[in-house]
Amino acid sequence: MNIRKNNQGFTLIELLIVVVIIGILAAIAIPRFSSTKGKAFDAAAKTDLRNAMTAQEAYYSDFQLYGATGALDVTASTNVTLAGTGSVGGYAMSTKHSQSTNTWCVTSASATIVKC
């Protein structure tokens, strides 16, 4: 008499292959996600700089000169430093996120945000 049990489940080899595949996918994906974090920090700094540019134009409309960043009604995002000067002739400003190595600059002459 031949009694066969109906064994259901995965073998050890099958489980090891799945673990190896997941490990390979994680090794590929993790570096891509870490660069995304840096891009988000830079986006926050650039957004604050755009807001400061708008505030500079509003300040100029009221006082016929560009103001220092302290005189503007702009609040920088968390961990973003905003600095700059202004005069009758124009302004120059920069921002930097504390978690990023990039500093972003803009002047009234160019009105384009560039990496400094």
Image (cartoon, grey):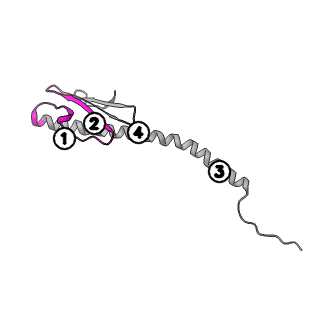
- The stretch in magenta equals 61-89
Dot 4 falls on a residue whose secondary structure is helix
> Could you say which is closer to the camera, residue 108 or residue 76?
76
Q: If you read the primary sequence from the N terminus, does the residue marked by circle 3 or circle 1 appear first?
A: 3
**Mark earlier in primary sequence (2, 4):** 4
Pointer 3 with pointer 1, Cβ within 8 A: no
**Residue where numbered disc 4 is placed:** 39
Residue 40, percent from left and from top: 39, 41
* Separation of residues labelled 2 and 3 (CA atoms): 46 Å
Please name the amino acid that badge 2 sits on. Leu
Disc sitting over residue 49 in the figure: 2
Q: Give whichever of discs 2 and 3 has the lower sequence position.
A: 3
Instruction: Name the amino acid, label 1.
Output: Asp
Q: Considering only order in the chain, which callout, 2 or 1, is on the residue closer to the N terminus?
A: 2
Which amino acid is tagged 4? Lys
Q: Which residue is mark 3?
A: 19
C-alpha distance separating marks 3 and 1: 54 Å
Residue type for callout 3: Val
Q: CA distance from mark 4 to mark 3?
A: 31 Å
Other-residue count near label 2 (Cα within 10 Å), few / some / many at <14 / 14–19 / ≥20: many
* Residue 108 magenta-highlighted: no
Q: Quadrant of the C terminus?
A: top left
Q: Residue at x 46, y 38 (%)?
A: 35
Label 2 SS: helix
**In contact (CB < 8 Å): disc 1 and disc 4:** no
Quadrant in which residue 46 is drawn: top left
Q: Tell which circle, 4 or 3, labels the residue nearer the N-terminal end.
A: 3
Q: Disc 1 designates what residue?
A: 73
Q: Residue at x 18, y 37 (%)?
A: 72
